[in-house]
Image (tube, grey):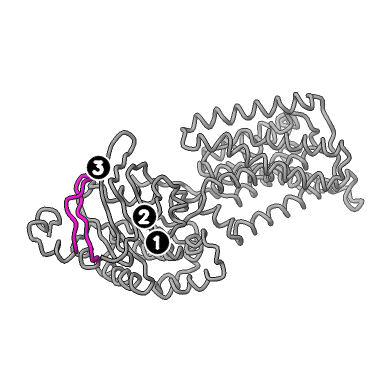
């Protein structure tokens, strides 16, 4: 019983990271209708920036905030320079661009910081929380930061003018333009926020998986799985999907014989396939019905 | 004729390589209601889209004396041109009230917005009853009223209305046109109205343009066009 509880909590902790990645994916998907394959690499690069700042002696939370700000700006710049010019281009153009971005960021990180594994400290420490063996302080911290982030995002989208403008621009760009909303900038803002959310995910997961240029590969896969489970059109669903995938992955890894630790990653893929077969629009997704 | 609010000269518009408008001229009087009539495919919607920068066009458009052709839609809108598009452009997942707030998004005088929302509710009490409801669940007529309400939230000088009567019951249409008349008078909004229902449009408007396959056939005071039987028969079909 204690093992079960322990695994559920650990699953929730990593699930929070998946939730952040899923949220970043959904945020851009809502704005431009495409999945950003480079989302994980962007988060990885952000984490390297955080690591570099820490190496230079910047205190942890200052580096944390600074990294978020830098990532936000980088997200905006990437959208303005690379994706704005092709916003009317077909899907394949976007796919090629995402893959290019993926490769460029990945090798840029390797070039600057090389491919050796680096360890990133946890701001919460690795000791058990309150001396209990149930959950480590870092896991608890991950859950807490994720929840705070989600609440902030919720408040932003529900209760601010800019949040409403962003929702309007994503839901109906033409009509939003007719209301005088600068849709292009709303998309850029979405990219910035997605990059910022991704950077939080990267910084929180780095102490667990170690920092190296390929660290986000599997995490992004889980993020996609979470987004697909929840439905790509539903931010709330993506968050739920993140926690669900985290817990399922952990429980399956512990309790299903043979699947064990090694095949954990295939569980994410299995979840993607299963959900797409049973409910193509995800658990909370909206089916897009087009009138003909 | 009173002061000119908008003047368009020699407007040509294209969808890709296909030319849709062939040198249309249009003058809208400050405070007036003008209607643009013509059959399906005559280019009425395209003309509205050209005026609000949603389609590639050449020629010259002056709004309150300043050239606006070639500007982004958002910038033209911010000058006070509210385009109520065909299909109504409802933000279906947002509530009725959020739809109205979206309409006021480009305004800087935030304090006046709640008051304006109440004013819109004054014109359309049905919207007030449904203020918290998802706009996608409204009936067609209610969504059209919401679209007009959203346009009003801009405090526009000019409203471009694209077939507001489309798909609505005659009684609702009559009610809506009555409200448009009131808005024109009390809010001092000039209007350019595109309509299939020529009789109704000529009743509301004081000036009319008749276009056919992207070219101007004739223009004049509504009463004159309504009185000309040959025009009525051959172009307006009633």
- The image quadrant of residue B58 is top left
Residue highlighted by disc 3: B22
Look at the numbered disc 3 and give the secondary structure of its residue. strand
Distance from the alpha carbon under mark 1 to that under mark 2? 8 Å
- Magenta-span inclusion, residue A170: no
Mark 2, Cα crowd under 10 Å, few <14 / some 14-19 / many 20+, is: many
Pick the residue in front: B64 or B84.
B64
Q: Residue at x 87, y 37 (%)?
A: A56
The reply to whether the C-beta atoms of the residues labelled 1 and 2 are less than 8 Å apart is yes
Which of discs 3 and 2 lies nearer the camera? The answer is: 3
**Do we see residue A43 in this rendering?**
yes
Tell me which segment is drawn in magenta: B205-221
**Do we see residue B92 in this rendering?**
no
Residue highlighted by disc 2: B85
**Upstream in the sequence, badge 1 or badge 2?**
2
Residue highlighted by disc 1: B147
Report in which chain the residue with disc 3 lies: B
Distance from the alpha carbon under mark 3 to that under mark 2? 22 Å
Report in which chain the residue with disc 1 lies: B
Q: Residue at x 43, y 71 (%)?
A: B120
Q: Residue at x 24, y 67 (%)?
A: B204
Distance from the alpha carbon under mark 3 to that under mark 1? 30 Å
Look at the numbered disc 1 and give the secondary structure of its residue. helix
**Upstream in the sequence, badge 3 or badge 2?**
3
């Amino acid at each position: 019983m204690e093992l079960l509880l322990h695994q559920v909590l650990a699953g929730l902790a990593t699930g929070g990271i998946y939730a952040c990645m899923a949220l970043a994916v959904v945020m851009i998907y809502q704005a431009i209708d495409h999945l950003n394959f480079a989302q994980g690499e962007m988060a990885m690069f952000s984490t390297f920036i955080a690591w570099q700042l820490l190496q230079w002696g910047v205190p942890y939370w200052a580096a944390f905030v600074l990294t978020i700000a830098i990532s936000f700006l980088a997200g905006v710049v990437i959208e303005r320079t690379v994706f704005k010019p092709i916003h009317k281009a077909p899907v394949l153009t976007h796919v090629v661009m995402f893959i290019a971005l993926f490769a460029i960021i990945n090798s840029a990180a390797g070039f600057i910081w090389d491919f050796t594994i680096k360890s990133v400290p946890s701001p919460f420490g690795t000791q058990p929380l309150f001396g209990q063996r149930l959950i480590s302080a870092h896991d608890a911290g991950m859950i807490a930061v994720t929840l705070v982030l989600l609440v902030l995002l919720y408040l932003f989208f529900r209760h601010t003018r800019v949040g409403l403008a962003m929702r309007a621009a994503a839901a109906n760009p033409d009509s939003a333009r007719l209301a005088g909303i600068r849709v292009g900038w709303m998309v850029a803002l979405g990219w910035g926020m997605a990059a910022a959310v991704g950077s939080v995910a990267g910084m929180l997961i780095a102490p667990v998986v170690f920092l190296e240029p390929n660290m986000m590969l599997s995490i992004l896969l889980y993020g996609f799985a979470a987004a697909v489970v929840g439905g790509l059109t539903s931010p709330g669903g993506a968050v739920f999907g993140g926690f669900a995938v985290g817990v399922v992955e952990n429980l399956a890894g512990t309790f299903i014989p043979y699947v064990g630790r090694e095949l954990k990653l295939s569980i994410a893929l299995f979840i993607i396939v299963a959900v797409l077969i049973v409910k193509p629009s995800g658990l909370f997704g909206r089916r897009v019905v087009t009138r003909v | 004729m009173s002061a000119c609010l908008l003047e368009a000269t020699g407007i040509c518009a294209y969808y890709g390589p296909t030319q849709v408008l062939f040198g249309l001229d249009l003058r809208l009087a400050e405070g007036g209601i003008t209607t643009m009539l013509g059959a399906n495919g005559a280019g009425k919607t395209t003309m509205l889209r050209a005026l609000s920068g949603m389609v590639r066009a050449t020629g010259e458009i002056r709004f309150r004396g300043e050239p606006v052709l070639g500007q982004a839609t958002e910038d033209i809108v911010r000058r006070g041109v509210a385009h109520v598009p065909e299909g109504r452009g409802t933000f279906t997942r947002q509530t009725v009230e959020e739809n109205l707030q979206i309409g006021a998004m480009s305004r800087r005088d935030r304090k006046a917005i709640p008051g304006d929302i109440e004013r819109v509710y004054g014109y359309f009490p049905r919207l007030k009853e449904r203020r918290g409801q998802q706009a996608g669940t409204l009936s067609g007529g209610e969504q059209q009223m919401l679209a007009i309400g959203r346009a009003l939230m801009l405090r526009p000088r000019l409203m471009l209305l694209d077939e507001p009567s489309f798909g609505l019951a005659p009684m609702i249409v009559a009610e809506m046109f009555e409200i448009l008349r009131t808005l024109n008078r009390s809010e001092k909004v000039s209007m350019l109205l595109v309509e299939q229902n020529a009789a109704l449009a000529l009743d509301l408007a004081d000036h009319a343009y008749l276009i056919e396959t992207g070219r101007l056939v004739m223009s004049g005071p509504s009463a004159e066009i309504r009185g000309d039987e040959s025009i009525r028969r051959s172009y307006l079909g009633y």
